[in-house]
Amino acid sequence: MRRKNNTLKESLIKEKVEVVEPLTFQIEEGKEIQDSLNQQLNDKIQACERLEGEIMLLKKELEKTKTELSFNQKFSKGTEDLNEILEAW
C-alpha cells in the first residue's frame, strides 16, 4: 500500500512538473519580452526628448532669422528712399 501511495505521489509530482516547467519557461520568455519592450520604449522617449530639443532650437533660429529679415527689409527700404532722394538732387 505504501509503495502504491509513493508511486501515486511520484506520478502526481511528475505531472505537476510537466505542467509547471512550460509555464516557467513562458514566464521567463514574457519577462525577456517585457524587458526588451521597456528598453525600446525608453529609447523612443529619449529620441522624442532629443527631437523636442532640436525643434525648440530650430524655432529660436527661425525667430532670429525672421527678425533679421525684417530688419534687412527695413534697411533696404531706407536705402531705396535715400537713393531716390539722391537721384532727385
Image (cartoon, rainbow, N blue to C red):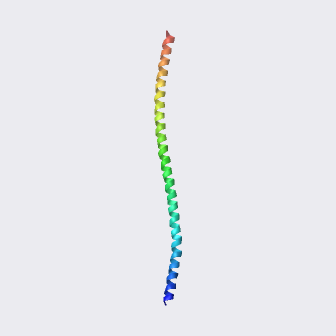
Q: Position of residue 77 (x, y in %)?
A: 48, 21
> Is 89 situated above or below 6?
above
Which of the two residues, 57 or 1, is positioned nearer the viewer here? 1
Residue at x 52%, y 61% (from the top left corner): 32
At a point 52% along the width and 75% down the height, the residue shown is 17
* Residue at 53 percent of width and 64 percent of height: 29
* Residue 83 position within the rendered picture, expressed as x and y whole percent measured from the top left: 50, 15
Q: Residue furthest toward the bottom?
A: 1
Report the front residue among 6 and 84: 6
Residue at 52% from the left image edge and 78% from the top image edge? 15
Residue 4 location (% of width, % of height): 51, 88
Name the residue nearer the viewer: 11 or 49: 11
When the figure is inspected, residue 37 is found, relative to residue 14, above or below; the finding is above
Q: How many marks?
A: 0
- Is 9 rendered above or below residue 20? below
Residue farthest top in this picture = 89
